[in-house]
Image: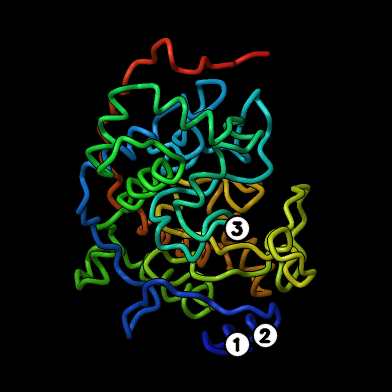
Amino acid sequence: MKHTLSTIAVALTAIVGITAVVKTTASPSEPISVIKPAVITEPEKVELGKMLYFEPRLSISGFISCNSCHNLSLGGVDALPTSIGHEWQQGPINSPTVLNADFMLAQFWDGRAKDLKEQAAGPIANPMEMGYTHELAVDTVASMPAYVARFKDVYGTDEVNIDRITDAIATFEKTLVTPNSPFDQYLEGDKKAISEDAKAGYALFKDRGCVSCHNGPAVGGTMYMKMGLVKPFHTDNPSVGRKAVTGRDSDKFVFKVPTLRNIELTYPYFHDGSVWTMEEAVNTMSDIQLGRLFNEQETAQVVEFMKTLTGEQPQIVLPILPPSNANTPRPVPFK
């Protein structure tokens, strides 16, 4: 039986008991909307946030920064199944891309942070990630006069606190968008911007119901969905998804739908990082979420479409960070 998009959408939400929360609506004629370039209205705050994003001294080891797990040279991920944290601890889940993250309805796979600012605070104090405390992070930043001067310029006073640190990081991260992908050019009227195979793949993507979950400007991130809706998803990963946040059994294995923007750069795929190729990812999702498989040609066409979602990557000039001094807490990289 051929399912329409609306039929699948109703069925999905009825089974899981959730609804989509869309931050930016798509155009009336297409379920996917164009990513626009970032408009920077607070350049000084963005620059401060960039410094803090690359600041390894926000970790107890003095080695791990936000960029360690969300590497802007690698599509905003670390290209590992699960991330490496303090003292070489294995993280519990795949690191999602920071690119276009502001389009998400929430942050982290389980949505436990409502926005980028709240997300930025988590890893600093997580013993498995950066292993620090917020208090020591503040003391570290406040010990360096060059940072204090920047905080005064941006916020009006020289007070350094975790609220301002995470606000600055989030402001920088909001600029990390990837506009002008071939598919965006196609949506804006250049029908030669993508190949015929990509067009066929997009038609399949819509016809089979993939856009029920992957829609909006980020082609995902607007809703939560059970991983393994039609068939179970078999994994050794211990993450239980939204259940860890809500405590509800109905939220077990329900995760935030990931963005497909720049998907060819953000391998390995899924919350457990178990799949390394787009072809396998496409057919796994088609099988366990929609109950049907693409044939070899269809798979190649869908993958060709998804590759057109790779946009212009942020061009980042690495910041020069201020030197530590006698008042700066010393790093503890080894016990």
Q: Is residue 324 left or right of residue 16?
A: left
| Residue annotated with mark 1 | 10
Chain-order first, disc 2 or disc 3: 2
Q: Quadrant of the N terminus?
A: bottom right
Q: Residue at x 23, y 64 (%)?
A: 185
Q: Residues within 10 Å of mark 2 (few under 14, many from 20)?
A: few
Looking at the picture, which amino acid does disc 3 mark? Arg
Q: Residue at x 30, y 63 (%)?
A: 35
Picture quadrant where residue 315 is located: top left
Residue in the foreground of this view, choosing between 202 and 71: 71
Chain-order first, disc 1 or disc 3: 1
Residue in the foreground of this view, choosing between 197 and 108: 108
Query: Which dot marks residue 14?
Result: 2
Q: Nearer the viewer, mark 1 or mark 3?
A: 3
Query: Which dot marks residue 112?
Result: 3
Looking at the picture, which amino acid does disc 1 mark? Val
**From mark 2 to mark 3, how far is it between C-alphas?**
23 Å
